[in-house]
């Protein structure tokens, strides 16, 4: 595996590979890698001749400074995992490499409704930051295929919109959420949970499964209310528990029994904010 710190070196390498018509798969991450990330990499490896992974903790997508400062960093282990997985190239840029002119100057991507709900509402500016870093990464290395996790459901929709805005030819592949054996969605932030918090955290999966198993056509408020209680019983402070149209994320108050739905949760287990979702009628 080649490790690139400079975008110029990566660009040169990828240009020569493109000449040979090699297909490039790209998996952007913020490091502290786990099997969820590795699953994305495996999907890329299976369908592309070259797989590039990036590790960059992007300051512009953190609306909470403390969350940014406490974001786990495990670069040595990450490099070992990537090499063992068979990844071809790691792009591990510095802040200056991604934002050579700084990032104080505001930017704006027209994300419309998507930015006004759920993560967009509770993390102001977050998706602008996601678009900003993704735009830069995709400019440096226009991939043929881009792999992202369903765990960040709304982010996948935002990036899909960004690809349209950029008129990018990259194809976005949304990969299923990998879970721990007890159901907790794998996440770099899970490493910040202590033993009790880790046990409590299962309540998110339980709440989502409760919604999936109990939702009936008609008003959905009762299943939402019960799932909120399940989270609160395990000391979660809830940002949202929502049932939404799976393709638009518009909230659904009354289900007609046919519309494709997704349930989404964001909640703090003490200091650590966790998110998860489940498609209810795939
Ligand atoms: P992150 O490093 O958290 O920014 O995540 C990098 C990519 O991995 C994103 O596309 C995430 O959606 C994806 N990802 C994170 N956790 C999981 C998981 N448990 N299963 C599948 N993909 C994941």
Image: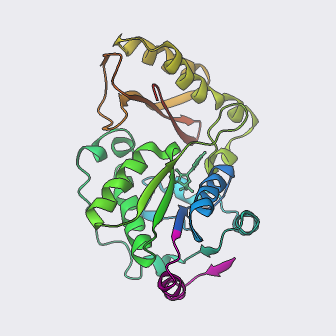
Give the quadrant of residue 223. Answer: top left
* Residue appearing at x 24%, y 43% in the figure: 113
Q: In this view, does 186 lie above or below 106?
A: above
Q: State the quadrant of the N terminus.
A: bottom right
Which percent across, then down, holds residue 70? 60, 56
* Residue 9 is a magenta residue: yes
Q: In this view, does 19 lie to the left or right of 185?
A: left
Q: How is the image coloured?
A: rainbow
Name the one closer to the observer, 271 or 72: 72
Q: Residue at x 30, y 38 (%)?
A: 248
Tell me where residue 57 appears, x and y as whole percent: 54, 64
The answer to whether residue 125 of the structure is visible from this angle is: no
Q: From this viewpoint, is residue 99 visible?
A: yes
Count of picture labels: 0
Say whether residue 206 is left or right of residue 86: left
Q: Is residue 56 highlighted in magenta?
A: no
**In the image, 101: left or right of 74?**
left
User: Which quadrant holds residue 260?
Assistant: top left
Q: Can you give x and y, in whole percent of width and height, for residue 149 in the image?
A: 52, 49
Which quarter of the picture shows residue 135? Answer: bottom left
In the image, which residues are magenta?
Answer: 1-24
Residue at coordinates 37% horizontally, 15% vertically from top-left? 220
Q: Residue at x 62, y 55 (%)?
A: 37
71 vs 145, left or right, is right
- Asked whether 221 or 105 is in front, the reply is 221
The percent position of residue 153, horizontal first and vertical second, equals 45, 43
Q: Residue lying farthest front?
A: 21
Instruction: Say if 107 sits above or below 269 in the image.
Output: below
């Amino acid at each position: 595996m080649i490790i690139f710190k400079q975008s110029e070196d990566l660009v040169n390498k990828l240009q020569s590979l493109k000449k040979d018509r090699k297909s490039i798969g790209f998996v952007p991450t913020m490091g502290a890698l786990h099997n969820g990330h590795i699953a994305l990499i495996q999907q890329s490896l299976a369908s592309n001749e070259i797989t590039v992974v990036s590790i960059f903790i992007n300051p512009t997508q953190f609306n909470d400074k403390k969350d940014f400062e406490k974001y786990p960093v495990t670069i040595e282990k990450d490099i070992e995992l990537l090499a063992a997985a068979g990844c071809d190239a790691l792009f591990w840029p510095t802040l200056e490499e991604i934002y050579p002119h700084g990032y104080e100057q505001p930017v704006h991507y027209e994300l419309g409704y998507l930015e006004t709900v759920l993560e967009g509402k509770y993390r102001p500016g977050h998706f602008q930051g996601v678009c900003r870093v993704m735009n830069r990464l995709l400019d440096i290395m226009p991939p043929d295929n881009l792999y992202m996790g369903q765990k960040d459901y709304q982010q996948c929709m935002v990036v899909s919109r960004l690809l349209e805005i950029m008129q990018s030819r990259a194809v976005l592949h949304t990969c299923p959420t990998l879970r721990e054996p007890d159901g907790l969605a794998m996440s770099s932030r899970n490493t910040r949970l202590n033993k009790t918090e880790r046990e409590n955290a299962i309540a998110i999966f339980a709440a989502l499964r409760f919604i999936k198993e109990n939702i009936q056509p008609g008003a959905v408020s009762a299943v939402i209310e019960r799932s909120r209680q399940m989270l609160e019983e395990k000391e979660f402070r809830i940002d949202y528990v929502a049932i939404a149209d799976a393709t638009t994320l518009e909230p659904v108050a009354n289900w007609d029994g046919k519309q494709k739905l997704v349930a989404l949760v964001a909640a703090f287990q003490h200091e650590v904010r966790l998110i998860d979702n489940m498609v209810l009628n795939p």
